[in-house]
Structure formats: C-alpha cells, structure tokens
Amino acid sequence: MRNGLIISAVLCAALALSACSAKKAMPNLSGMGEITVISREEGSGTRDEFENIIGTDADGTDKIALSAAEVSEMVSSVEGAIGYTAYTAAASENVKAVSVNGIALNEENISNGKYPLCRSYYLAYNGELSAAQTDFLAYIMSAGQAIADDECVAVKKSTGFLSDKSSGNIKICGSTSMLTLIEKMAEDYKRFNPNVVIEITATDSSDGLNSAIRGECDFAMSSRELADYENELLEKKAVARDGIAVIVNAENPVDDLTEKQIKQIYDNNAEKWSDLK
C-alpha cells in the first residue's frame, strides 16, 4: 500500500510539473490581421538592449519612434501594433504590457531578475566631478533612491542625505527613458541644496554618452550597457533598474509572448498575428 502511495505521489508531481511547463496556448488571432512592428531610433539605449537580449536585427520594423512616449502613442493608435518601451512609460492609455516567457513585468520580477528584459540605468561622466556634481550624485545614491523606487526599481535602500550646499551648474543629457526619473530626482534634490542649477536634455543614450566624452555635458543618462570604448573613457554609476516592456494595443487578445515569438516578429518572420507559432 505504501509503495502504491509513493508511485501515485510521483505521478501526480510529474503531471503537475508537466502542466506548469506546458506552453500557454495562444488565443485566436485570425481576426487581428497584419502586425505593425515599431522600433526606437538608432542610438536609443532601449533599442540596443532590446535587440541584444532578443537577438534580433529588427529587419521587420515598420515604423520608428523617437521617444518612449511616441512608442506608446503609435501602439495605442494601431490595433495590430507591437513595440517596446521602458517599464516606467508602459502605463499608457490603450496599450498593455504582455508577459514574456510567462513572466509578468513588475517591480518584483525586475528586482529579482526573473523578467527576461531587465536593464540598468546609468549616469556616466568624464573625469573628476566638481563639488556640486559629487553632491548631486551622493544624493541620488542615498535619498534619491526613494524616487528610483517610486519610478522604477532602486539599486539600494534609500538612506538619509546631508548636502554640503555646494553651488554650481550641472548639465545632464541622454536617454529619454530616464528623463522622468532624473527630472524628479533633480527637483527633489532642491530641497537639500537650492544652490545648484540642473539642466536636463533628453536625446538618446548614445548621443548623451558621446556628449559626455566630448565634455559637452556633466552626466550622460544611459539606459543601455556601455560599449568597451565608452567604459574606457567614462566612469559610470548604476542609479536604478528597469525592465523593457513589450507592449501591444489594449484590444489585442495576446497577453503573453515568448522571446522566440518576439524575435519571430522583429526578424520579419511573422507578417500576421496568426503566423505566430
């Protein structure tokens, strides 16, 4: 009798494991028509990280968006569209973020690294920092982490901050994905030190990094990993964590895509939603 119970338990466990690992069935997509594939512009850190993780050259791209907000606008206006954007920019009207490999995009899954499309946000700089720049960076890595936790995912626990009241100007440029985060940090920093004027310009990660290398800005916002030559020329500090959201129109019945299916779409191997395997 005991052997029978053991065998029964093993069979039940095997069946449960099989059910958990079974691929989620795709909904009926016959009425969804053609896929409109949206990518970010060249130089975008989000684009670089997305294509690197998915392993695609994005030959299937139909439209180019020049900012995170524009991706959401394009996807919301076309029922068959798909795009990618920062987790912080994914909560837009008429779009939804799909799970990837069955893993939902949320702060917990970004923090523990389970979500497949995770990345770090960096501030990069060239050479020795001024007193004002050092003070601002110290704020970001202490009290500023509360802002990071509100906007995306903090890299460390928020702690108290005591400014040295340095004065000066700080010029920051780069990633549009980081814009809201850094703007809110800069605004909150004024509570501690009103003597610093911070100017923030959003372009893209590559442009920001090149500007920092040339000495045209004090900090570059980068939403991608730095290339080898960039790492040689710049110092960097990871200030937050984020996930890249894969978004579709809210009317799309798809709630989950595998990395393989996303690659299929961006590689131009699926022209219609019903082509997905």
Image (cartoon, grey):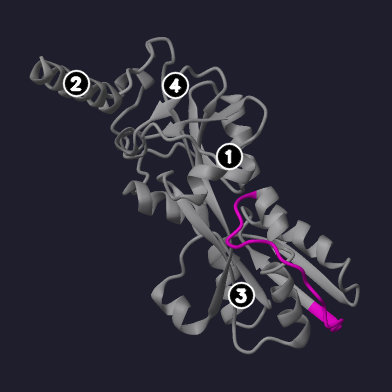
Q: Quadrant of residue 223?
A: bottom right
Which of marks 2 and 3 precedes in the sequence?
A: 2
N-term-proximal mark, 1 vs 2? 2
Figure quadrant of residue 106: top right
Near mark 2 (Cα within 10 A), the count class, few <14, some 14-19 or many ≥20, is few
Front disc: 4 or 3: 4
On screen, 49 above or below 141? above
- Label 2 sits on what residue type? Ala
Identify the residue position indicated by label 4 in the image. Answer: 254
Kindly report the distance in space between the C-alpha atoms of the residues bearing marks 4 and 1: 18 Å
Direction from residue 275 to residue 227 in the image, left or right: right
Q: Quadrant of residue 276?
A: top left
Mark 2 or 4, closer to the camera: 2
The N terminus - image quarter: top left
Q: Quadrant of the C terminus?
A: top left
Secondary structure of the residue carrying numbered label 4? loop
Q: Which residues are magenta?
A: 152-169
Find disc 2 in the rendering and name its residue. 9
Tell me which amino acid carries mark 4: Val
For the stretch drawn in magenta, the main secondary structure is loop
Residue most extreme to the front: 1
| Res 40 visible | no
Q: Is residue 46 above or below residue 252?
A: below
Whether pointer 1 and pointer 3 mark residues with C-beta atoms closer than 8 Å, the reply is no
- Of residues 96 and 57, the one nearer the viewer is 96
Magenta stretch encompasses residue 157: yes
